[in-house]
Image (spheres, rainbow, N blue to C red):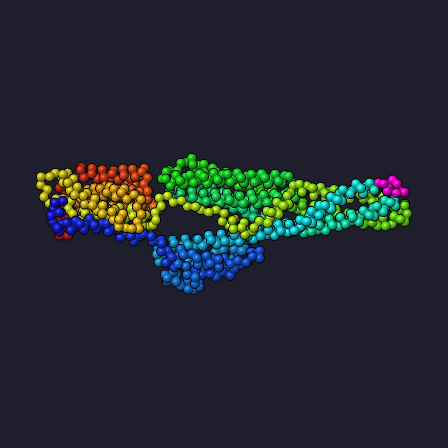
């Protein structure tokens, strides 16, 4: 220290050594403050050739919607050009990528209403040789476009479907007065049946009363004729309405089947992922798949909800009309099983979330947790298969059967009323000729009496039908359900779930995240500069043992390294204005700890092994840059570097500095500090035990190397 202070040349050189490593950190950190803030400068060509299409008469153009959305999106530098210009620019590197929306894009989306829909395709061309990172950014932009298209298309399809239901609800509401009037006519006719019977019996038993009864019957039959004719007209209208409702309802059946199949695919995917999770996977893979399980379980639960809603619509709109308590019970049983599926999916989502949180905290996932998750997924698959089989083999055929029965009942009612009308015509003709003679009148009355049981049975059948229909079905609920706002329902089902992100230990920019790596790297580089330019052996060492020389010279290097660490950490805190450091004081102290450990390691290697030690220190630096996880997560680097990662001091030094930058978890600090000190202890033991035995041998090697004239 005295020689440095009294020799101005030495002081200048040492001062340069103390300052130089910090420049390495400051320049690199400042250059990487926030590179992703300028992604709008990455040019991506957008070529729209879409000609549009129609779904059930509703025109749409998905390509135009994409262009409209991207004009308000400034994440990337979108360039809206023709195909020739877009392909030329991406080939010559003026654009990083070009996205082409083909002319049949909307047309293929519209095939969703066909038996075999075709998948729409967006063509994505990227120039990988332009830059290593840019293709990843532009690829994310392309994925975002496909997600937006999917959401918009689902909204269009749902809007069309609910518009059909809305039209059915409006039509049913318009027919409601006629429905009520028909009920009144039938019930009136039913109440008059005993009177008709009494008159017929009285006519047969008392011929003298024939003329009076004929006159009275002539007054009653026009009203009955009017009632029957009104009933026939109403049934004709109701048949037309039911035919339309039946056609509209049939569009719901394949939707239920598709939703159940989608639910089946989601459950099988969750089961496959949970099987894979029980294998020996990396932490990143486990976390990714656990996140996928949560997303798929949430989507499956939503799909089960939608299927329940659709089944409930059928239960209210079809089953109750078909007078089938068994069908209603089957529907409720199937809905209950869907509830069980949702319960299993919800539990799978909870278990996946719990496992994900454990993996975030660095904990090893327990077998019992993954086993429970797998069992929940298996149970969901089994339940979905059972629901799918029951729906396809029993519910769907039963619904079709009851629809046909209802239609047949209406047709039978129409035929009954037609028979009644014919009977009334016969009665009218009979009464017109009643005056020609009592005998002929009695014969006609006998005919009317014979026809009465059939008339009474048919009228009672229709009345019973109306009573049961009114008892089991609330027509106002059906109308209210069908008349829901189609646009609101369609938009909700297109995007029913929103993702809310919670950031733990948030950092404002990329440079703050890279600060620990570059700071630790600069401290190690500073140690290399010290051992490269300063001598580890004093020129006058007579009277000192090798161990005294080792520890005495180590103190000098430690002092210089500590000053280097202070300069770089203080500069990070006070000079780099855009860099965020949560705990500045601990950041400086952790930097001093790292400098102590590093200088002990590097100095010991050079002091014991001379020039060979310098090479070892450089080799160790190279391997630590690649394998310490300073830039990429350890789980993403090759397996060789993953295996040697725990044996690098950089691994724990970078983690220690990250705690001070993002927010301290003292358990991790304790673990990292202890492991760092273990490296220092091992280095001190190496220097203490090997310095003296190897000293003469290394001096001899150094002398021979110096004689070559190539080494100092």
Q: Is residue 202 magenta?
A: yes
Res. 269 visible in picture: no
> With respect to residue 55, does 564 lie above or below?
above
Give the x, y percent position of residue 337. Answer: 55, 39
Residue stretch in magenta: 200-209
Q: Quadrant of residue 54?
A: bottom right
Measuring from the top left, give residue 681's x and y in whole percent: 22, 37
Compared with residue 571, is residue 371 higher up or lower down, i.e. above or below?
above
Left or right side of 637 for 248: right
What residue is at 90 percent from the left and 45 percent from the top?
Answer: 439
Q: Residue at x 38, y 53 (%)?
A: 136
Q: Is residue 538 visible?
A: yes
Q: Is residue 47 left or right of residue 399?
A: left
> For the view shown, which residue lies furthest in the top direction?
368
Residue 682 vs residue 72, the one in the foreground: 72
> Of 478 and 245, which appears nearest the observer?
478
Q: Point out residue 433 in the picture as x, y percentages from the top left corner.
A: 87, 50
Q: Which residue is more in the foreground, 503 or 444?
A: 503
The structure residue drawn at horizontal position 44% and vertical position 46%, both measured from the top left corner, is 499
Image quadrant holding the N terminus, namely top left
Does the magenta-highlighted stretch encompass residue 206?
A: yes
Where's residue 665, x and y in %? 32, 39
**Residue drawn at 56 percent across, 57 percent down:** 58
Q: Main secondary structure of the magenta part?
A: helix
Report the number of numbered marks.
Answer: 0
Q: Is residue 151 left or right of residue 591?
A: right
Vertical placement of 690 versus 169: above or below?
above
């Amino acid at each position: 220290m005295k020689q440095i202070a009294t020799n101005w040349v030495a002081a200048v050189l040492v001062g340069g050594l103390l300052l130089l490593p910090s420049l390495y950190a400051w320049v690199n950190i400042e250059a990487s403050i926030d590179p992703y803030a300028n992604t709008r400068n990455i040019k991506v060509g957008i070529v729209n050739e879409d000609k549009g299409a129609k779904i059930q008469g509703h025109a749409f153009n998905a390509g135009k919607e994409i262009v409209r959305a991207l004009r308000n999106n400034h994440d990337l530098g979108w360039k809206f050009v023709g195909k020739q210009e877009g392909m030329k620019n991406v080939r010559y590197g003026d654009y990083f990528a070009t996205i082409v929306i083909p002319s049949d894009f909307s047309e293929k989306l519209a095939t969703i209403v066909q038996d075999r829909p075709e998948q729409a395709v967006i063509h994505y061309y990227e120039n990988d040789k332009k830059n290593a990172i840019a293709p990843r950014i532009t690829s994310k932009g392309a994925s975002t476009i496909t997600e937006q298209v999917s959401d918009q298309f689902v909204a269009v399809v749902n809007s069309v479907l609910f518009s059909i239901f809305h039209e059915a609800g409006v039509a049913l509401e318009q027919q409601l007065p006629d429905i009520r009037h028909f009920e009144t006519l039938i019930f009136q006719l039913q109440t008059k049946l005993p009177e008709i019977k009494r008159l017929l019996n009285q006519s047969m038993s008392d011929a003298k009363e024939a003329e009076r009864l004929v006159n009275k019957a002539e007054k009653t039959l026009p009203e009955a004729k009017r009632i029957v004719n009104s009933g026939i007209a109403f049934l004709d209208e109701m048949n037309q309405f039911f035919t339309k409702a039946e056609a509209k309802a049939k569009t719901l059946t394949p939707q239920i089947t598709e939703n159940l199949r989608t639910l089946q695919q989601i459950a099988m995917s969750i089961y496959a992922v949970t099987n894979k999770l029980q294998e020996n996977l990396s932490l990143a893979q486990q976390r990714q798949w656990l996140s996928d399980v949560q997303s798929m379980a949430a989507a499956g639960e939503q799909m089960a909800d939608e299927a329940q809603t659709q089944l409930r619509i059928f239960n209210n709109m079809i089953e109750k009309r078909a007078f089938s308590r068994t069908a209603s019970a089957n529907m409720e049983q199937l809905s209950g099983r869907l509830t069980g599926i949702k319960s299993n999916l919800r539990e799978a989502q909870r278990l996946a979330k719990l496992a994900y949180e454990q993996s975030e905290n660095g904990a090893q996932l327990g077998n019992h947790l993954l086993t429970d998750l797998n069992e929940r997924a298996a149970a969901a698959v089994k339940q979905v298969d059972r629901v799918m089989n029951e729906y396809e083999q029993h519910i769907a055929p039963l619904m079709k059967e009851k629809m046909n029965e209802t239609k047949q009942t209406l047709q039978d009612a129409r035929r009954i009323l037609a028979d009644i009308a014919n009977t009334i015509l016969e009665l009218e003709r009979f009464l017109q000729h009643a005056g020609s003679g009592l005998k002929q009148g009695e014969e006609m009355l006998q005919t009317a009496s014979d026809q009465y049981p059939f008339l009474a049975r048919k009228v009672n059948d229709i009345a019973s039908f109306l009573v049961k229909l009114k008892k089991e079905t609330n027509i106002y609920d059906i109308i209210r359900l069908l008349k829901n706002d189609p646009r609101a329902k369609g938009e909700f089902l297109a995007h029913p779930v929103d993702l809310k992100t919670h950031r733990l230990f948030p950092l404002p920019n990329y440079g703050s995240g890279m600060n620990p790596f570059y700071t630790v790297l600069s401290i190690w580089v500073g140690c290399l500069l010290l051992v490269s330019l300063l001598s580890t052996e004093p020129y006058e060492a007579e009277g000192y043992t090798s161990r005294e020389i080792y520890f005495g010279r180590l103190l000098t290097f430690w002092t210089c390294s500590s000053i280097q660490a202070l300069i770089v950490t203080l500069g990070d805190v006070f000079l780099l204005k855009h860099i965020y450091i949560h705990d500045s004081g601990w950041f400086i102290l952790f930097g001093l700890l790292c400098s102590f450990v590093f200088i002990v390691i590097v100095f010991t290697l050079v002091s014991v092994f001379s020039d060979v030690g310098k090479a070892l220190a450089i080799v160790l630096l190279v391997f630590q840059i690649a394998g310490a996880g300073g830039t990429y997560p350890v789980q993403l680097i090759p397996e060789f570097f993953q295996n040697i990662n725990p044996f690098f001091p950089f691994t724990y030094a970078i983690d220690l500095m990250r705690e001070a930058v993002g927010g301290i978890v003292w358990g991790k600090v304790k673990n990292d500090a202890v492991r760092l000190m273990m490296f220092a202890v091992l280095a001190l033991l190496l220097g203490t035990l090997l310095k003296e035995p190897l000293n003469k041998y290394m001096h001899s090697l150094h002398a021979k190397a110096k004689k070559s004239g190539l080494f100092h």
